[in-house]
Amino acid sequence: MKKTDSQSTKANPRLPDAPAASIEELRTLLIGITKGTSPISLGKKSRDAFGRILDIQDSTRLLSITTLSEEINTNPSTITRLAKNLGYQGFGEFQKALLATRLQQPGTFYLNQAKSALSNANQPSKQQAVRLCHENQANIDHFIDNFDTESFEASVKLIAEAPRVLIYGIRQFHSLAAFLTYGLRLIRSDVSILDANGLGAAEEIGGLNEGDLCLVASVAPYSTQVVHVAEVAHKQGLTVVAITDLASSPLVKQAKASIFAPHQSSFISNSITSFFAVAECLINAVAASSSTQTEESLVKRQEVIKQLKVEGQQ
């Protein structure tokens, strides 16, 4: 049974002069709606449906309102109401904006090929591996094709200039937090994982000062702990940067800048391969923004490694 949008879309007395014409504009619009800075307002279920639509990689799922409604588990009437509340005459105009960029995306090709060629459940191990790798390739391609330069560069600047950086992610995303901490510590020493020693998030956030930065990472269905940490950090005057999946993510509301990465795949849990690619891009960009500091830090790190004989002799 399909879900209904029990929370009705709020009236929008003042719409923009022209509706969004591309996936990039739609994503920016959803961020504004989520933050409450857009003249358009949507109920939570409508925002969630909007976010799921923006994250669809397979363009064929957008060719029919019926297929699309089945994909995001809602009713066609909900999508039609959403389109009209976003300023479109109907689904057709909304569909045109959604497809404007996606039809050129190579990531769609990878995912469609993987799904069509490897559709049987009882496949050899190599075929299963190929399918999963192609899906991960598709996610990374999707991130590249929808790269938000403004938000990414804002995140880099905030991280590079913050007096201290605290990174938080739990379960799978704890590994991402650890990787980001390791990479950023190659550049600067004042980066740490929130609650790494189990001393309590409240104590660590309370020990930071206004202007310090808290980087949070989570994807749907979103860890409640991470959402609460983002909220508390924001209230304490910390700068929040989010790495997440959708513009409707609850982390976006608290974040000064957000980086989005898709993670659709046949992996048994949330796939995080694309998020590690994002982390590498972020670490490199922060390093490049402070090239002199990075060089000095890496030289010092290499000297310590040499003294501790961490690496074998060649």
Image (cartoon, grey):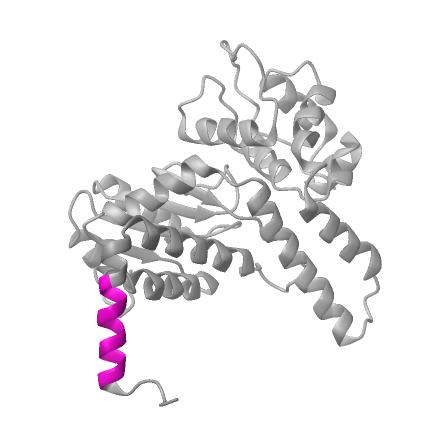
User: Residue 74's spot in the image, x, y percent?
Assistant: 69, 36
Left or right relative to 30: residue 53: right
Residue at (41%, 51%) from the top-left corner?
Answer: 224
The residue closer to the viewer here, 52 or 178, is: 178
Left or right relative to 295: residue 40: right
Q: Is residue 35 above or below residue 125?
A: above
The residue closer to the viewer here, 103 or 212, is: 103
Q: In which quadrant will I find the N terminus?
A: top right
Dividing the picture into quadrants, the one containing residue 234 is top left
Q: Is residue 172 above or below residue 302?
A: above
Residue at (39%, 46%) from the top-left corner?
Answer: 242
Left or right relative to 116: residue 302: left
Dividing the picture into quadrants, the one containing residue 38 is top left
User: Residue 13's spot in the image, x, y percent?
Assistant: 50, 9
Q: Is residue 269 above or below residue 6?
A: below
Q: Is residue 300 magenta?
A: yes
Dividing the picture into quadrants, the one containing residue 271 is bottom right
Query: Is residue 200 among the parts visible in the rendering?
Result: no
Q: Is residue 34 magenta?
A: no
Q: In which quadrant will I find the C terminus?
A: bottom left
- Please identify the dominant SS of the magenta region: helix
In the image, the segment drawn in magenta is: 296-307
The residue closer to the viewer here, 115 or 226, is: 115
The residue at the far bottom in this view is 313
User: Residue 11's spot in the image, x, y percent?
Assistant: 53, 15
Residue at (61%, 36%) from the top-left corner?
Answer: 54
Residue at (43%, 56%) from the top-left corner?
Answer: 279
User: Residue 125's spot in the image, x, y percent?
Assistant: 75, 75
Q: Is residue 81 above or below residue 270?
A: above
